[in-house]
Amino acid sequence: MSRSSLSVPPLAGGGRVAILGSCVTRDLWRMMGAAADDLLYVSRTRLPSLFAARPQGMVLPYGLHPDLRPNPAQALRADLTKTALARLAAFRPDVVILDFIDERFDLLVGAGGAVTASWELETSGWDALLPRNALRRVDALSAADATLWRRGLDALATLCAPGGALSGTRLVLHEARWSNALQTPSGRIEPLDPDLEITPGRRASRVAHNARLARMHAATRAALPGLEVVRAPESLILSDPDHVWGLSPFHYIPDYYAEIWRQLGGRS
């Protein structure tokens, strides 16, 4: 059974931590000024893509994309070439922290595989290198996507079960949600646009994605025995217009990160 609180914070004793999620969780280390020596960050991939095969006929140039920062470029290449899962297993983490904010992206499915239709993929131009005629786009809010995501969750559960590559790893779900409002530097609360541009020209509803995240969180709690949960109160789910990555429904005020860090038992 999952636990909604942590009797022993998973980071209090140190150890190797892997993040399977987004910058929402990675930013905890940045915002709290904590060392990230034993931290593995796997991002810009979705559960269906993480466990999928590499699409046949995909040819990528050598090296990182010159127009992307190193971390996003590495994450993009890992999602396309399907190296993230092996890297996660080889890291042998003591703790894996999940968050599903990057599940907002659509999928590109076909040619025997699937990839994440991330902002980095579409703005880098590498999407033109994929076998486009063989791939179909699956909307993140569709029933078809929900089916693929559930298969990814089942594959994760198998990976974490006895005999799996992550057997014995402590699992924590960071139940991050999209904010509905921002907090100005003066402390004033203002509403956010109800939609967000997920990738160029494709907008999506905050309400719809938060409902989807709630379903994902519930399914994950049911599928992963021993799962622990960290979750900020609604009063802290506020966007920061001065956030280092810019204004977004999942770029929060500093107090959000401090609260999640406290629940995790992290040390600065």
Image (spheres, rainbow, N blue to C red):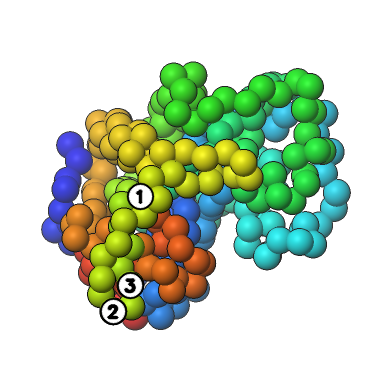
Residue type at mark 3 is Thr
Picture quadrant of residue 264: bottom left
- What is the number of the mark on residue 184? 3
Residue type at mark 1 is: Trp
Q: Quadrant of the C terminus?
A: bottom left
Image depth: mark 3 or mark 1 in front: 3
- How far is mark 2 from mark 3, CA to CA? 5 Å
The quarter of the picture where the N terminus appears is top left
Image coordinates of residue 160 in percent, x first then y, are 39, 38
Question: Residue drawn at (77%, 57%), measured in percent from left and top?
Answer: 65
| Position of residue 177 measured from the top left corner of the image (x, y, whole percent) | 32, 49
Disc 2 residue type? Ser
Residues tagged 2 and 3 counted as in contact (Cβ below 8 A): yes
Residue in the picture at 19% in, 60% down: 235
Looking at the image, tell me whether mark 3 or mark 1 is earlier in sequence order: 1
Residue tagged 1 = 178
User: Visible in this render: residue 130?
Assistant: yes
Q: In the figure, is residue 35 to the left or right of 113?
A: left
Front: mark 1 or 2: 2
- The mark found on residue 118 in the picture is none
In the image shown, does 104 or 170 lie closer to the viewer?
Answer: 104
Q: Is residue 56 left or right of residue 251?
A: right
Label 3 to label 1, Cα distance in Å? 17 Å
Question: For residue 194, which quarter of the picture?
Answer: top left
Residue labelled with disc 2:
186
Q: Secondary structure at mark 3?
A: loop
User: Residue drawn at (42%, 69%), measured in percent from left and top?
Assistant: 241
